[in-house]
Amino acid sequence: MKWRRSLLHGIGMLILSGMPAVQAGPMALGAAVSGREGFMTYCAGCYGVSGKGDGVIAELLKITPENLTQMSVKNGGKFPRQRAIEVIDGRAQVAQ
């Protein structure tokens, strides 16, 4: 299952690499970038520019991307920072 997610992520990144409206620009490995730049490069294809889960490749995914604008609402009004970090870096389990 992990290899499928990695493959899908790779395909998504290939799609995004040709989309100047979504891609914020090239990032060197280890380069410091703004949160917006990182989001636009790595996340907006699935989550959409607004973060509502309506990105250009969202409909191709097995699991619909979450509406990121509702994360605090779903967590009693507090942004789940640690959970978000663990999902992004792969430590947290996510539904498949």
Image (spheres, rainbow, N blue to C red):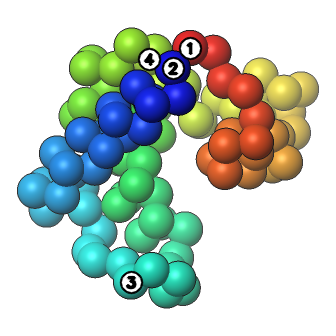
Between discs 2 and 4, the one toward the N terminus = 2
Q: Residue 6: where, in percent of width, then height?
A: 42, 38
Between discs 1 and 3, the one toward the N terminus = 3
The residue type indicated by label 3 comes to: Ala
Asked if disc 2 and disc 3 are in contact, CB closer than 8 Å, the reply is no
Residue drawn where x is 44% and y is 17% of the image: 64
Between discs 2 and 3, the one toward the N terminus = 2
**Distance between the alpha carbons at the discs numbered 4 and 3:** 29 Å
Mark yes or no: residue 79 visible.
no
Circle 2: element type: loop
Q: Which mark is residue 96?
A: 1
Label 1: how many residues lie within 10 Å, few (<14), some (14-19) or many (20+)? few
**Distance between the alpha carbons at the discs numbered 1 and 4:** 10 Å
Label 3: how many residues lie within 10 Å, few (<14), some (14-19) or many (20+)? few
The residue identified by callout 3 is 28
Q: Residue 34: where, in percent of width, then height?
A: 52, 76
Q: Residue 52: where, in percent of width, then height?
A: 46, 31
**Distance between the alpha carbons at the discs numbered 2 and 3:** 29 Å
Between discs 4 and 3, the one toward the N terminus = 3
Circle 3: element type: loop
**Distance between the alpha carbons at the discs numbered 2 and 1:** 8 Å
The residue identified by callout 4 is 64
The residue type indicated by label 1 comes to: Gln
Mark yes or no: residue 14 visible.
yes
The answer to which quarter of the image holds residue 20 is bottom left
Residue drawn where x is 25% and y is 31% of the image: 57
The residue identified by callout 2 is 1
Circle 4: element type: loop
